[in-house]
Image (cartoon, helix red, strand yellow):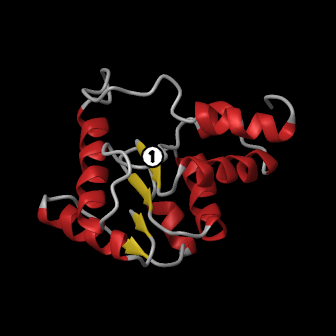
Amino acid sequence: MIYGRSLEAQATASLAAATGYDSHIFDLFPASASAQIDTDTAVILLCHDLNRELPVLQAAREAKPFYLGALGSYRTHTLRLQKLHELGWSREETTQIRAPVGIFPKARDAHTLALSVLAEVASVRLHQEEDSCLPRRPDPCGRAWRALSRLRGKYP
């Protein structure tokens, strides 16, 4: 499930379809979409608006998809974590969000980002029962959490 109306979202949906993934692209989060998220779902947030991400993130929190990735810089992710913490998310829950999304650092163009995201989704999917073939950051949200803790004065 791909959320966003951006060129990145369109490129990711096209590449996903070309590689055989059953993909659905949404601009807004329809109420019926939360029923479609399950442990066999990859949720990819390619919006540039945290407020539009929140309903999707809340639904994913309950459904526990095998992959949850979000577009944005570490600074953007810090703001995302701050908002999620205000909504009661724990650090353990937010570490499930892969951000910045994809395996290529700082992929700038839509097609490179699409390839980067789908490579990460495929790696996570293929290696769910074992460690991913990709080097995993020890704490994918660590940098953002440290920045958030400096803003708040401590870890939550």
Pick out the residue farthest to the right. 153
Q: Residue at x 32, y 42 (%)?
A: 103
Q: x%, y% of residue 146?
A: 69, 32
List the residue tagged with mark 1. Answer: 65
Question: Looking at the image, which is closer to me, 20 or 117?
Answer: 117
Compared with 48, 154 (above or below) is: above
14 sits to left or right of 121:
left
- Residue 96 position within the rendered picture, expressed as x and y whole percent measured from the top left: 52, 38
Quarter of the figure that contains the C terminus: top right
Amino acid carrying label 1: it is: Pro
> Looking at the picture, does residue 16 appear above or below residue 132?
below
Decide if residue 74 is on the left or right side of residue 106: right
Q: Residue at x 85, y 39 (%)?
A: 152
Secondary structure under badge 1? loop
Relative to 74, say whether 146 is above or below.
above
Counting every numbered tag in the picture gives: 1
Q: Position of residue 93 (x, y in %)?
A: 62, 37
State the image quarter where residue 18 is shown. Answer: bottom left
Residue depicted at 51% across the width and 56% down the height: 72
